[in-house]
Amino acid sequence: MKKIMLCCSAGMSTSMLVKKMQKEAESRGLPAEIKAFGAAEFDNQLANYQVVLLGPQIKYMQADLQQKANAHGIKVEAINTMDYGMQKADKVLDFALELIG
């Protein structure tokens, strides 16, 4: 099972994208747990996931969050602004899977 965390300011703006990503994963027959959280929940949720994708609005936090994630061997990357804005769940899912390896 692939475990993907999306993180934004409050966890609200990514929730639509999460739903679309879940549908995309299902259509591919890919078992995945994809959830959205606010940045304030990052520390508590981090260890439960294989990769963290950041909403463009908190991209500026990437270096600090990556530093925390390094202890768990987890990559933290910002979602492409266009893919995020256009809600391209397939592209964002592919990006997450690529980061998981």
Image (spheres, rainbow, N blue to C red):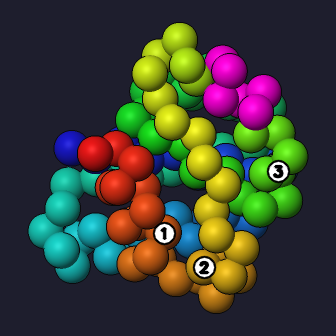
Q: Residues within 10 Å of mark 2 (few under 14, many from 20)?
A: some
Q: Main secondary structure of the magenta part?
A: helix
Mark 1 sits on what residue?
Answer: 92
* CB within 8 Å, label 1 to label 2: yes
Q: Is residue 47 magenta?
A: no
Residue 75 sits above or below residue 67 on the image: below
Q: Is residue 11 visible?
A: no
Question: Which amino acid type is marked by label 2?
Answer: Asp
Q: Is residue 83 above or below residue 65?
A: below
- In the visual, does 52 lie left or right of 37? left
Give x and y (percent) for residue 27. Answer: 21, 79
The kind of residue on which mark 1 rests is Val
In the displayed structure, 61 sits above or below 46; it is below
- Name the residue tied to disc 2: 83
User: Magenta residues?
Assistant: 63-68
Mark 3, other Cα within 10 Å: few <14 / some 14–19 / many ≥20: some
